[in-house]
Image (cartoon, helix red, strand yellow):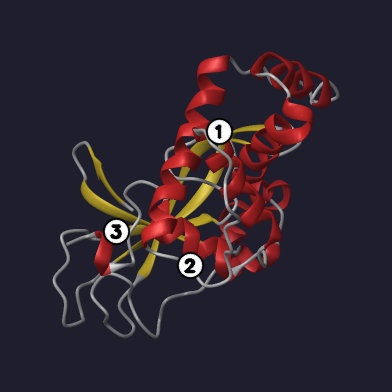
Amino acid sequence: MWARTPGRGVTLQLQDDYSGVPLSTVARRRRDIYGLIPDFRDKCPLCGGKDCAVRHGLYFRGVVDRDGQVYEDFPVPRFRCRRRGPRRPEAVTFSVLPAQLVPRRRLSLPLMLWLVSLLGAAQRSVEQVLDALASATAAAPEPLVLDAVALYRILTLFSQAYARLQSFPVPGLTLAAPRVGGRSQAQTVAEALSRASPSEAVLSFHRLYFPNLLFDSRLRR
């Protein structure tokens, strides 16, 4: 995903499974976080050069985990490209997000999947889902409270992903035939992600089908 930071130009966001470590553990790692991800010495994701990418510190963002735990300063590692490869990308830095996170969204992917699944269970209403969320996170330091607008945005995101998956299928993600209506399309994508292997299929889905993610030239032409 390309992102323009005011005063800093363009950067790139990648995603990795972080060796399968849960978000709660990653949140505590800080500088040790680099030990959970590739070092990119063999090939820089930006220019393709060997021994090019170097560590470039951390930035911090807000994250809400599946259990409602809120991390206001979740660490995300960054790298800097020294342009030693054949390509000349616009970006000079890139960051590496855990696969459980969605770029530009505070809510984690597991939490989004759970909320979408609740809508499909016994055909709950939006209000019932929001009440269930508040009850499920009541044990957290601060119970998680969302409004209907936030939930509808999640449904829209997954419905958009459904349309993209129809045009560009991802190996390992099998979509069942949806029922009529945008909500059922969102549920179809959520069910496919829940059935898929926890690493490569989900990472491929992130890279290709959430808005503005890259790594498929067919979507960037």
In front here: 85 or 56? 85
In front here: 132 or 49? 132
Nearer-N-terminus badge (2/1):
2
| Residue 95 seen in the figure | no
Q: Nearer the viewer, mark 1 or mark 3?
A: 1
**Side (left or right) of 2 relative to 7:** right
Question: Which amino acid lies under the numbered mark 2 shown in the image of this protein?
Answer: Val
Residue 142: x and y in percent read 74, 19
**Side (left or right) of 83 relative to 65:** left
- Residue 12's quadrant in the figure? bottom left
SS at circle 2: loop
Question: Which amino acid lies under the numbered mark 1 shown in the image of this protein?
Answer: Arg
Residue at the disc numbered 3 = 93
Residue at the disc numbered 1 = 183
Residue 13: x and y in percent read 38, 55
Nearer-N-terminus badge (1/3):
3
**Side (left or right) of 109 relative to 82:** right
Residue at the disc numbered 2 = 170
Q: What residue occupies the far right of the structure in this picture?
A: 139
Question: Which amino acid lies under the numbered mark 3 shown in the image of this protein?
Answer: Thr
SS at circle 3: strand
10 Å neighbourhood of mark 2: few (<14), some, or many (≥20)?
Answer: some
- Which residue is located at x 31 percent, y 85 percent? 50
Q: Nearer the viewer, mark 2 or mark 3?
A: 2
| Residue 134 seen in the figure | yes
Q: What residue occupies the far front of the structure in this picture?
A: 180
Q: In the picture shown, does residue 162 fall above or below 48?
A: above
Mark 1 in CB contact with mark 3 (< 8 angstroms): no
Q: Nearer the viewer, mark 2 or mark 1?
A: 1
Q: CA distance from mark 2 to mark 3?
A: 27 Å
